[in-house]
Image (cartoon, rainbow, N blue to C red):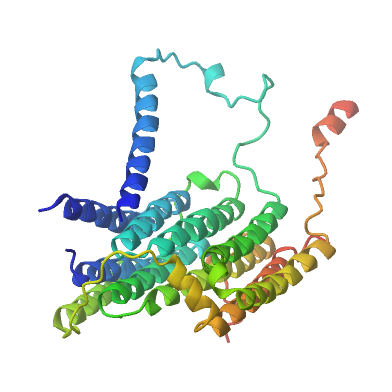
């Protein structure tokens, strides 16, 4: 239990430092707002569209694969702790577990869900500029 | 020493808030959040009884399996929600009544 | 009152209030971020229940995995520009009635139930015990979990990519 007080202290220190720094700059930094300052920064160009864009579906698929293997890793920790006592039996059991999950990984790989297809850029504004 | 009842009361309140969320929200993702609250409160009950009543840690093992079920449930549910959104451009569950007789 | 108990009350308040924010917040993205505080509060409560491995699992799987997926769901199913609009809701009174009824019923049962004599267990590291249990007594559920995860992975990906072809 004592070890978790360290974790709690760590959380508090982190939260305090971040909020302290943000509050400090809020109080002491001069604030002069004008319209050019409030637009999102896109390397000096004028921003196009909104910051709330629709995500590409493939991000979700990658997140999904991450979640499944995240869960798998949580089982590896207690397994690793007792591995020395259990010996070969523990190895075989975990081997079956991982092989079953690797079938899913192979499926995802073969079906090409991990290949990244870039979205086609919309060039409507260029076409319009040419026509005029 | 913290009593068993205090954990049960927290769990009961969060469970009711989750139930409220499930009834109140029309957005499918909001309903999923309510389901997650309910699953968490059930987990808390399991772990509390595992500490105070059970001599072994069966409750904790049950809680681990519930967490994993919750993970796969969230993955499937969000995939279905995304598919609905793609076909209907809306995730309002009150409008999904095409299969109603 | 000990410092331990004050800390417990603070954690309980964090958990319950952020859960209330999930329920009552009008914007879905606020609910999603309040859910972060709720999950973390539950992890802290698990530490009080001497479930150290479970607390870490809660953080890794819920905060690191499920919450990310829910945030993806929020961001991908909102129409552009509709994020500032309030979301539609069902009847508040009926929902409140359901919530209050269930809370009242459970709290009534808690206050009336004759509990078994409580054990005063100390704090023990649980990771090794859990590992042993998974590989012996709970072996069948453990292996079935792998099949479940396989089914969830393939099924969810099949549904999610339906359109891409």
x then y, percent, for residue A43: 67, 22
Which residue is found at the position 40% from the left and 65% from the top? B37
Give left or right: position of C11 versus C25: left
Please provide percent x and percent y for residue C82.
54, 47
Q: Residue drawn 70% across and 50% down?
A: A56
Give the residue furthest to the left. Answer: C1
When the figure is inspected, residue A125 is found, relative to residue B9, above or below; the finding is: above
| Quarter of the figure with the C terminus of chain C | bottom right
Q: Position of residue C72 (x, y in %)?
A: 58, 53
Relative to residue A128, is residue A35 depicted above or below? above
Q: Which quadrant holds residue C124?
A: bottom left
A81 shown above or below C114: above
Residue B85 shows in the view: no
Spot occupied by residue B81 in the image (x, y as percentages of width and height): 60, 65
Q: How many callouts does the rendering have?
A: 0
Relative horizontal placement of residue A102, taking residue C85 as reference (left or right): right
Q: Nearer the viewer, residue C67 or B4?
A: B4
Q: Nearer the viewer, residue B84 or B8?
A: B8
Is A94 positioned to the left or the right of A19 in the image?
right
Which residue appears at 34% of the width and 69% of the height? B44
Please indicate, yes or no, whether residue A122 appears anywhere in the rendered image: yes
Which residue is more in the foreground, A132 or C138? C138
Between C69 and A106, the one lying in front of the other is A106
């Amino acid at each position: 239990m004592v070890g978790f007080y360290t974790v709690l202290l760590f959380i508090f220190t982190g939260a305090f430092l971040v909020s302290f720094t943000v509050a400090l700059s809020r109080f002491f930094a001069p604030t002069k707002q004008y319209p050019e300052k409030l637009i999102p920064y896109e390397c000096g160009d004028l921003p196009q569209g909104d910051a709330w864009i629709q995500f590409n579906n493939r991000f979700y698929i990658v997140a999904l694969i991450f979640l499944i293997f995240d869960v798998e890793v949580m089982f590896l920790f207690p397994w690793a702790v007792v591995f020395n006592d259990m010996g070969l039996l523990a190895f075989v059991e975990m081997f079956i577990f991982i092989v079953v999950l690797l079938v899913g990984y192979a499926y995802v790989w073969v079906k090409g869900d991990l290949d990244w297809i870039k979205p086609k850029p919309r060039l409507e504004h260029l076409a319009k500029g040419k026509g005029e | 020493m913290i009593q068993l009842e205090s954990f049960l009361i927290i769990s009961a309140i969060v469970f009711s808030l989750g139930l409220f969320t499930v009834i109140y929200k029309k957005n499918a993702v909001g309903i999923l959040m309510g389901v997650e609250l309910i699953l968490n409160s059930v987990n808390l009950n399991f772990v509390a009884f595992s500490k105070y009543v059970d001599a072994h840690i069966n409750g904790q093992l049950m809680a681990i399996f519930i967490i994993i079920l919750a993970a796969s449930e969230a993955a499937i549910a969000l995939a279905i929600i995304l598919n609905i959104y793609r076909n209907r451009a809306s995730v309002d569950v009150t409008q999904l009544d095409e299969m109603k007789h | 009152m000990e410092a331990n108990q004050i800390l417990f009350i603070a954690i309980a308040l964090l958990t319950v209030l952020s859960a209330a924010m999930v329920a009552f917040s009008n914007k879905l993205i606020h609910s999603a971020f309040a859910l972060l505080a709720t999950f973390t509060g539950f992890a802290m409560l698990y530490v009080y229940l001497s479930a150290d491995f479970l607390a870490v699992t809660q953080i890794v799987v819920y905060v690191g995995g499920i919450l990310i997926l829910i945030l993806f769901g929020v961001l991908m199913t909102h129409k552009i520009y509709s994020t500032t609009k309030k979301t539609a809701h069902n009847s508040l009174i009926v929902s409140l009635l359901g919530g209050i009824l269930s809370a009242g019923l459970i709290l009534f049962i808690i206050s009336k139930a004759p509990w078994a004599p409580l054990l005063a267990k100390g704090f023990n590291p649980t990771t090794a015990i859990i590992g042993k249990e998974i590989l012996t007594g709970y072996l069948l559920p453990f292996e079935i979990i792998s099949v479940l995860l396989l089914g969830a992975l393939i099924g969810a990906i099949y549904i999610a990519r339906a359109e891409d072809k």
